[in-house]
Image (cartoon, helix red, strand yellow):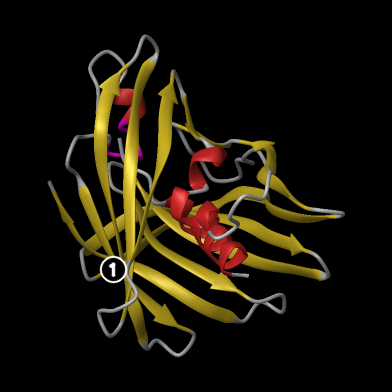
């Protein structure tokens, strides 16, 4: 169950993207600052606004490619007592006017180690972001399916992001400042054995910064948790 929780959290927070460059810099850097060493820090809150912990991400190994750029994003979590740290990395590429996150890279070595010698078959569709957003735009679905071989039985886990769309533009204020944002909605569904849950998500994305705020809801639309940008550095 830890795997499912971590995978879902990763997909919900995937909207925290930043990127640099030269000939493709203006496209790749529109919403996602792609610069070596850029660090984003976030505060995590529960449904009542109580601080649950913090999350950070840093751009590493940023390289130019023929059509844009690619980078590794290193991410870390820690609870509100400064304990239970967890870190992972995932890969992101900017190819012309599209930014992609490699879904397979979301499965960190630490995540997979808990399954020991079991064989895993992984398929899916990478998460894509256009470098230009506008209200009313629909974004491609994304998802991943992992099937673990457990002798005579297989355990199948699915994580899907569907109904992705740009709802509107809005100005919001968070600890890191005031930002003009695009509001992005998605349905984040997880399926594992007999468990099938949908966690709608809404994210506020600002040009040149990336994710400023996210909110996750239960199936009835009530707030479950939120995340806000607290600091930016490089």
Please tell me which residue is depicted at 34% across the width and 75% down the height of the picture. Answer: 84
Name the side, left or right, on which 50 lies relative to 4. left
Name the side, left or right, on which 22 lies relative to 185. left
| Percent position of residue 213, x then y | 39, 63
Q: Does residue 54 belong to the magenta stretch? A: no
Q: SS of the residue at dot 1? A: strand
Compare residues 101 and 31 and report the one nearer the observer: 101
Name the side, left or right, on which 19 lies relative to 125. left
Q: Quadrant of residue 188?
A: bottom right
> Looking at the magenta stretch, what is its main secondary structure?
loop
Q: Is disc 1 surrounded by few (<14), some (14 to 19) or many (20+) residues within 10 Å?
A: few
Instruction: Look at the image and give the residue range highlighted in magenta.
Output: 29-33
Q: Quadrant of residue 120?
A: top right
Please tell me which residue is depicted at 63% across the width and 70% down the height of the picture. Answer: 1
Q: Where is mark 1, residue-wise?
A: 173
Q: Quadrant of residue 61?
A: top left
| Percent position of residue 162, x then y | 69, 50
Please tell me which residue is depicted at 30% across the width and 83% down the height of the picture. Answer: 80
């Amino acid at each position: 169950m830890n795997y499912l929780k971590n995978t879902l959290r990763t997909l919900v927070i995937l909207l925290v993207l930043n990127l640099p460059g030269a000939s493709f810099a203006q496209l790749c850097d529109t919403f996602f600052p792609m610069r070596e060493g850029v660090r984003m820090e976030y505060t995590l809150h529960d449904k009542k606004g109580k601080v649950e912990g913090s999350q950070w991400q840093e751009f590493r190994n940023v390289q130019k490619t023929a059509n844009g750029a690619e980078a590794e994003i290193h991410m870390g979590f820690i609870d509100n007592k400064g304990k239970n740290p967890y870190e992972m990395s995932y890969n992101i590429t900017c190819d012309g006017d599209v930014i992609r996150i490699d879904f397979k890279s979301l499965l960190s070595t630490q995540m997979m180690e808990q399954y020991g010698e079991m064989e895993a078959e992984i398929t899916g569709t990478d998460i894509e972001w256009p470098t230009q957003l506008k209200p009313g735009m629909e974004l491609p679905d994304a998802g991943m399916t992992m099937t673990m071989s457990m002798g005579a039985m297989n355990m199948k886990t699915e994580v899907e992001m569907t109904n992705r769309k740009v709802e509107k533009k809005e100005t919001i204020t968070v600890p890191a400042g005031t930002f003009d944002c695009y509001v992005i909605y998605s349905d984040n569904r997880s399926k594992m054995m007999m468990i099938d849950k949908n966690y709608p998500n809404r994210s506020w994305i600002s040009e040149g910064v990336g994710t400023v705020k996210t909110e996750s809801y239960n199936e009835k639309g009530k707030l479950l948790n939120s995340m806000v940008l607290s600091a930016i550095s490089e």
